[in-house]
Amino acid sequence: MAGKTKRAEFHISGFDCAMCTKIVGKALEGLPGLKEINVNYVVNRGYVDYDPELTTQKAIEERLKEKTKLRVVRRKGPTG
């Protein structure tokens, strides 16, 4: 059974336009347990709601760093 949803919040820099938000979504495609991805390039922030039984905040952060040219910094620990 799916576990409790947690939220990973990030400060993301390097955005040039709204298309970068789609790049973030594409980079996270296929990562198990993602429930919602929300990125706002205007304020350089984003969050990902995820199932901690299927993935981790570290895996999300590493995937973003690996698949994009954006600078990703964890804003705070996961929340319930």
Image (spheres, rainbow, N blue to C red):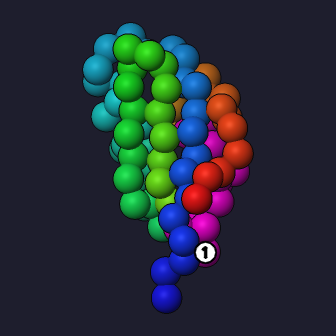
- Can see residue 16? yes
Crowd class of label 1 (few under 14; some 14 to 19; many from 20; radius 10 Å): few
Q: Quadrant of residue 21?
A: top left
Q: Quadrant of residue 70?
A: top right
Q: Position of residue 54 (x, y in %)?
A: 57, 72
Amino acid of disc 1: Glu
Which residue is at a point 61% across and 52% down the rendered structure image? 79
Q: Position of residue 8 (x, y in %)?
A: 58, 46
Residue situated in front as seen by the camera: 63 or 75: 75
Is residue 23 depicted above or below 35 in this figure?
A: above
Q: Position of residue 15 (x, y in %)?
A: 44, 16
Residue situated in front as seen by the camera: 37 or 66: 37
Q: Helix, strand or loop at disc 1? A: loop
Q: Main secondary structure of the magenta part?
A: helix
Q: Position of residue 34 (x, y in %)?
A: 45, 60
Kindly identify which residue carries mark 1. Answer: 53
Range of magenta residues:
51-65
Which residue is at a point 54% across and 51% down the rendered structure image? 7
Residue situated in front as seen by the camera: 57 or 17: 57
Is residue 54 depicted above or below 71 in this figure?
A: below
Dividing the image into 4 quarters, which one contains the C terminus?
bottom right
Q: Is residue 36 magenta?
A: no
- Can see residue 69? no
